[in-house]
Image (tube, rainbow, N blue to C red):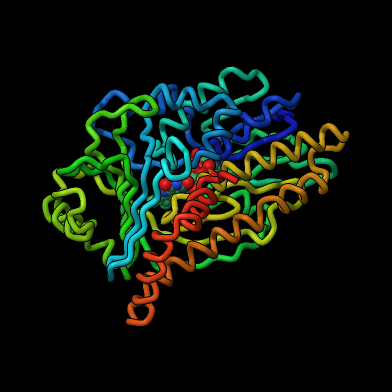
Amino acid sequence: MNMQRKFDIAIVGGGLVGASLALALAEFELSIALVDRQAFTADKTPFRNSPGHFDPRVSAITPQSKRFLESIAAWDGIAAQRLCPYQHMEVWDGEGTGSIRFSAGEIQQSALGYIIENSVILAALYQAIAQHRNIELLAPWELASIASKEGGVSVLASDGSVLECSLVVAADGANSKLRELAGFETREWDYGHNAIVTTVKTGLPHQATAWQRFMPTGPLAFLPLDGGTKEGGSVGQQHCSIVWSVIPQRAEALMALDDEAFRLALGKAFEYRLGDIEWTDRRFQFPLRQRHAQSYFRDGVVLVGDAAHTIHPLAGQGVNLGLLDARALASEIGRGLEAGRSLNDERILERYQRDRKGHNMSMMWLMEGFKHLFAEQAPPVTWLRNLGLSTVDNFSLLKNQLAKQAMGID
Ligand SMILES: Cc1cc2nc3c(=O)[nH]c(=O)nc-3n(C[C@H](O)[C@H](O)[C@H](O)COP(=O)(O)OP(=O)(O)OC[C@H]3O[C@@H](n4cnc5c(N)ncnc54)[C@H](O)[C@@H]3O)c2cc1C
């Protein structure tokens, strides 16, 4: 194939962030190409009809992200499948006595957030995209090279086809090839952690609570899964998605265990808060790397989501930051169009960068700080940490303010 097509905007990467951005832009009179190396299959929810089986990749979606997903007409499609609203969050120090518990009721909210399988969110996004004639899906489509020229960018696929666009968005994830081809510089370092993710069944119900134990070796999270198909429903409540971040050698050892030995190790690491671990699904492992692009745009290419920043999953913020990028970029493009500007006008992209870069960076530093704080085993630090957690827990004004910030409520 050797085809040349013209679009106003090409979004490379149709994951959670790229697909959301396409929807947010759809209201403008723009022709949008959404391309991905993976085929967009009709059914992205292979787990939907199998109770007790869940997508190993899930996201903790904040109320702020929920509002954005509502605004792009994707939330109803999610709620019609399955999600688990969580009302509480319990965080404790594995090396001491400090703990903190957040509750939605204390800040007059119905939920602190929602644990949703990534495939459920994607299915809803693509259902919504199908309603828009100005979004064209091209997949499987593999990025090969790009060439910037006066007034736009040519994007070449490995099959020889070319997309001519005014603006190209890199939404192709943490190892973004587009970011590399366009010559963006990044600041990056290893967290020295690998994350093991899987689904587990626990002896006791999860109580609509997101649980996190901090250990010197890394955090272990249990995220509630089966809260019912609709908001507020409750079915089963014994399945959780776990994210266990540990140093790579320990991760290899845990991955090598048979299911029974893994269940025992997991139960012990989680201090049996939800009883014994009765069952675990297949395990997956992800190396964790922190990465932040030094600039979010150059030569008609703009970065969003994990292509711009990758962050430790300990606070479940990665997708949420990416959705805020999508919302901000669409809003700045809308404002620029109203002012009669071209899509690659640097004033639009500069405003987007100003809106998002500082916020993303502060979240990354916070995660880095948490990691170091809980890795420290010296007695004065553990004492202060325990005191700090318990003090915040007893000081409801500060605690509620922290919860509101994490949820994106002003
Ligand atoms: C273990 C773990 C747990 C996590 N838990 C949470 C959580 O609870 N909450 C949260 O908010 N975040 C979480 N995250 C982070 C979250 O998964 C990411 O932030 C999010 O997936 C980023 O979305 P994205 O659309 O930017 O990138 P991706 O989801 O990586 O999507 C990129 C897309 O680009 C496509 N692509 C890639 N290369 C090319 C190419 N060359 N050509 C064409 N297409 C291409 C891919 O096929 C893919 O569809 C977690 C991450 C990890 C590792």
Query: Residue 231's x, y, as percent?
Result: 39, 28
Query: Residue 49's x, y, as percent?
Result: 29, 23
Query: Residue 278's x, y, as percent?
Result: 14, 44
Residue at 37 percent across and 72 percent down: it is 375
Q: Quadrant of the N terminus?
A: top right
**Vertical placement of residue 313 versus 119, above or below:** below
Residue 121 in sight in this render: yes
| Total numbered badges shown on the rendered structure | 0
**Vertical placement of residue 339 versus 366, above or below:** above
Identify the image quadrant of residue 256: bottom left
Residue at 63 percent across and 40 percent down: it is 326
Query: Residue 72's x, y, as percent?
Result: 59, 28
Q: Nearer the viewer, residue 385 or 366?
A: 385
Q: Residue furthest left?
A: 260
**Vertical placement of residue 380 versus 303, above or below:** below
Q: Nearer the viewer, residue 157 or 62?
A: 62
**Left or right relative to 142: residue 275:** left
